[in-house]
Image (cartoon, rainbow, N blue to C red):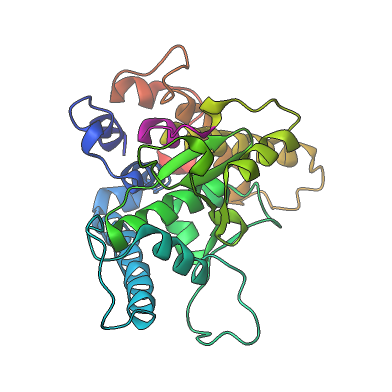
Amino acid sequence: AYQEWKFLHDPVVLPQTRIEDGAIAIEKFYEKHDTILTAKCIHSWEAYVLHELEQFADIVKKRLDNTRSCCDVLPEDSIHGYPILEVIEVMKYLFRVPGPLDDDPSVPYFSGNVGDYYNHTNSLIRDCLVRKTGIPITLAVIYAAIVRRVCGVQMDIIGLPGHIVVGVPPNGGDDTSRVFVDPFHEGRILNLADCQAIVERYNMTYTDDMVRPISNERVWERMVRNLIHSHSMQALADDNDNNGRYGSESSTQHEWKIAIPLRFLLSDYAPRITNFRELVAAPGWCPQFF
């Protein structure tokens, strides 16, 4: 996991990375040592992540094809024949809370995990694909990965204060005409005013740089910070749980401890780990990993 993380951050490799690559690398830090030694399971669930993204892209393509007339003229700027605005409209079919009259109850829909927001699994891409729920940044990564497979457009990840949305890349115009999507809230399509309202809900003053896309590297680091925060909150819950409701052998009491080594992967954390030996020597590793 560490070697892959370093590889993805190589200045030569980084521009060629996909947004889901770093999310997959992060999840590999959560594999137990016996799984890592066999390597078989890691490759199988990594294949599962990529397979699921392809499957969801196929679902969107089929719905797009079903809504298109055989006489429709495809736009010249659409790489795979699907205009991006049509794609994000159909993406609402996947990112929503299903109702009792849904035409295909077998389709698993993605929704924001409001009830268990700070569960650390909400920041792990495989877990989110399995449970079909997560926090804004993980759902944004999944959303962007699906859209890219559908129409070839790389959606921007927009790091608003306290929230993450995705944005359609600007086509030479200003931000006032840009289109954004909120995967956490049922794939709701937003405009600039909606993004400004989100910022204002956090009692902050909006600035134009808040809707500038953040790099893959910054997205992955933000995911790491979310994990650290989730584990830290779990640690506080364990410390306050005098009755030991999780049991003395529960992994829940220990999972948060991996948060300390993860901090060393952040670019602005000092001292920063520069090699695997230093990472292994870092304090705080969970016993189940070594």
Give me the residue at 31% from left, 55% from top. 148
Q: Viewed as shown, does residue 33 lie left or right of 78?
A: right
- In the figure, residue 85 lies in which quadrant? bottom left
Q: Viewed as shown, does residue 139 lie left or right of 250?
A: left
Give me the residue at 51% from left, 47% from top. 123
Percent coordinates x, y for residue 262 in the rendering: 46, 30
Give me the residue at 48% from left, 58% from top. 127
Percent coordinates x, y for residue 142 in the rendering: 42, 55
Quarter of the image with the N terminus in it: top left
Quarter of the image with the C terminus in it: top left
Give me the residue at 64% from left, 80% from top. 99
Magenta-tinted stretch = 211-219
Above or below, 213 against 188 in this view is: above
Viewer can see residue 257:
no
Percent coordinates x, y for residue 55 in the rendering: 33, 71
Percent coordinates x, y for residue 215 in the rendering: 38, 32
**Residue 136 highlighted magenta (yes or no):** no
Q: Which of 273 and 217 is in front in this view?
A: 217
